[in-house]
Image (cartoon, rainbow, N blue to C red):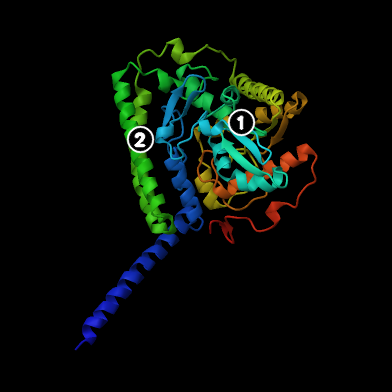
Amino acid sequence: MHERPLTRVLLLAVWFVLVPLGVEGLSRLAYRVTRGRWYSPDVCRSALLERVAGGEGGGLRRGEDAGPSPPGGLDPEVLHPYLGYVPDPARRSSGVTIGDPSQIVQRSEHTVIIGIFGGSFAGGVCDVAAPALQPLVAPPGRKVRVLCVASGGYKQPQQLLALAYILALGGQFDIVINIDGFNEVVLPPVENIPHGVSPVYPRAWYWRVGQLKDPRVLTRLGALYAVDARRASWAAGFLHWGLCRSSALSMVWEGRDGALASERGRLLAELQAHEAVGRESYAVTGPRLEFADDRALYDYLARVWSESSAQMRRLCEANGIEYYHFLQPNQYVDGSKPMDDGERKVAIRAGHPYQKEVVSGYPLLRRYGQDLPAAGVRFDDLTMVFAGIRDPLYVDDCCHVSPYGYRLVAWAIGRAIRVHRGEPEQPDALTGPVPGRGPSGPGA
């Protein structure tokens, strides 16, 4: 009498277990076929974190929004009287922005204070730097405190000005680490110069200040920010509930995020096609610079990058701070990383607006970098830091890597600092177990 209802309950229980398992298995197989590699929760989390924090890389998807953009892409930012713009602490998950009181700290005999400067790539290193750098740069008995003075899209001379700004407010550092180069040669030709804006002005300056009296542009900007907010909220929900454990659910996130990205692209195209009011204003364009050809432009950008670094070194030296400068890696530098088909689908896009700038600008950065030690700068070229790493690292077709990739960079920085100090080398951290790296790659 009671067997039939019990059997139904058991069948339903089996159904509700097997069906989700089957869907999950099929989704992982589909991911393997379409991406060329197995699904990684670590890559998913990295993409979601970047979306919530304001990054505009593609994450699990391709970076569909590359190219000229209005202020900050997804970044919640506000204008700043000295630095151009800073992250808005009221709309940032960490609640900390450049010059925040928490960054104005004094030296202590118990703590090594490290300031990390640069753009979004440097910001990624900030997230993993403290545990990676602790055993490499801190004497026994002293802890490492990392202050992130990096912000998405920052390029020289913003790092130089940010350093001067914090020092003027009374902040102190033991070590300043500057990780940059990519934004310096990529963003001016793609975002500033097409609108007649000085290449040394902050990124997308045209969109930040040039449209303030144009109601049609303000309306489109409002719609664009609303889309950005929905994308960030959608990603934050997935992070909160830990849904990256499921490849099927992550593909659901990708689907809606992709639809919102398409809407964003439409709004962005309308903005770029609109003839704005006041585009000739000096407040928008800054000083007009003429270049004989592209090489002259890239040479100028690399020279500003080099001179800004030398000035940061002088400022640090005057304040008893160790200064170290690193040229960040990028996937479009030829031979910089071996990639399987899966990573190549994510990291490389033929005809990407940034590819030409990296190919043209990085050789000049590396050339000027070779001259920096003569100016007293402790400089290291990290463009080949991933040359021996076959694990997938890049999470978009711009420039960003997984947490494991940022840890590799942090370790390379720590070892370089020891070399510059003339301290004995430690065993290579990469020869042993690596935190966050599974048997089949990061997060597997």
Residue 176 at x, y percent in the picture: 65, 32
Cα distance in 3D space between marks 1 and 2:
28 Å
Residue 152 at x, y percent in the picture: 50, 33
Residue that numbered label 2 is attached to: 264
Residue 188 at x, y percent in the picture: 53, 24
Q: Is residue 387 visible?
A: no
Are the residues at dot 1 and dot 2 in contact (C-beta closer than 8 Å)?
no
User: At label 2, which amino acid type do we have?
Assistant: Arg
Q: Counting other residues with Cα less than 10 Å from the Cα at mark 1, is it few (<14), some (14-19), or many (20 or more)?
A: many
**Which residue lies most toward the front here?**
109
Q: Is residue 230 left or right of residue 440?
A: left
Using the image, tell me which numbered label, if any, was put on residue 181: 1
To which quarter of the image does residue 273 belong?
top left
Residue at the image point whose x is 50% and y is 43% from the top: 396
Name the element at disc 2. helix
Residue at the image point whose x is 69% and y is 52% from the top: 429
How many discs appear?
Answer: 2
Of the residues under marks 1 and 2, which one precedes in the sequence? 1
User: At label 1, which amino acid type do we have?
Assistant: Gly
Using the image, tell me which numbered label, if any, was put on residue 31: none
